[in-house]
Amino acid sequence: MFPRLPEEKVWWGDKSPMSEFMKISIVIPVFNEQDSLRELHGEICGVAQSSAYDCEMIFVDDGSTDRSWEAISQIAADDARVHGIRFRRNFGKSAALAAGVRAANHDWIVMLDADLQDDISELPKLINQANAGFDLVNGWKADRQDPLSKRWPSKVFNWLVNRVSGTRLHDHNCGFKLLRREIFEEIQLVGDWHRFIPVLADSRGWRIAEVAVNHRRRKFGKSKYGLSRFLKASLDLITIGFLSNFHHRPQYVLGTVGLFSSITGAAGMVYLALYWLVRMTAYPAWPPVHERPLLLYSLGALLVGVHLLALGFLAELIVANRGNQRTLYSIAETTRHENANEPVRESSVRVDGPSLTRNKQRT
């Protein structure tokens, strides 16, 4: 639960009771959004002031080719609550979120896109739901202000995720989320897995909720979503579905299929052996064994089964002896204020197994 203000009531502009006071870190991945950043910063500051939130803003420039980094640097120079991170190239939204969370100082993380389509003024709704005991509150663009070419693929994608994962949400890929920092310490973000954060959290037992939020038409720039990303997300969904159920014991699925295939192939070979014996002793007119299609099917099933069992053993060894994985991204520079309490410099950030760890050097 979020801590309450001890002896003070805070009011919104409409004079309604204020939500519980909290400290939050807002992580904002940025890719070619130079025109929206200053306005987005102003909106966040307005919500923080009206709702008495102690918030920091972390803008992660994911290899933008426009002047996004210049805009972030200017905002950070004017506001000590803003921290900027710039990647050397585009590493993807998952890497940007991971870097932002590592740089965050608070226990509650707000994920927010930089395109101004998600309305940050809806944040109190998410906080109220979290105060009800939920660990992750996912936004839901109930009245989505996007063209039909984006809405229908999104509906198909969400239907597929619901069916495969069992985590029932209207909008898995909404960029507006509130969640505990500990969730990022238990899940792994690679590729485009940011789309499946609720699924990954749900598979670990965290409590998930969904809140309808206001969605606005894109004001600047252009959408980054296309057919290629839909196809990649569909392939990632297969991986997520497997890992959600068999992450720690891959042999359960590989071994089961391999064992069934091996038994089927072995049974076919036994039958053919008996067939050959009967043919040799009593029925020489029967077709020879090598002319029976069952021979190829049985050999194929036996070989596939053995290979799947061996693959399952290898997967078990990898899970049992998982080593450090390579860095997901490379940071070119960051913004830091000279009066920061504990200035740090990011170095050799890495992922150890499924948990996100922070490796920093003091400056």
Image (tube, grey):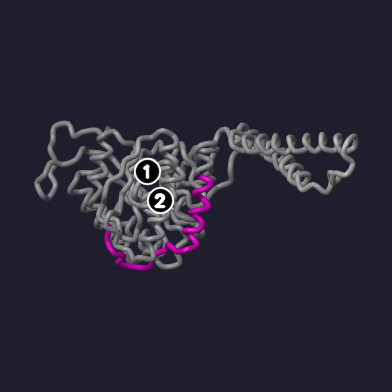
Quarter holding the N terminus? top left
Q: Earlier in the sequence, mark 1 or mark 2?
A: 2
Looking at this view, is 23 or 145 the one in front?
Answer: 145
Amino acid type, residue under disc 2 in the picture: Trp
User: In this image, 251 relative to 298: left or right?
Assistant: left
Specify the quadrant of the image occupied by residue 246: top right
Residue 242, horizontal then vertical, whole percent: 53, 41
Residue ranking furthest to the left = 15
Relative to residue 202, is residue 236 depicted above or below? below
Residue bearing mark 1? 168
- Point out the stretch of residues depicted in magenta: 215-240
Label at residue 159: 2
User: In this image, 129 relative to 347: left or right?
Assistant: left
Neighbor class of circle 2 (other Cα within 10 Å; few <14, some 14-19, many 20+) is some
Specify the quadrant of the image occupied by residue 144: bottom left
Neighbor class of circle 1 (other Cα within 10 Å; few <14, some 14-19, many 20+) is some
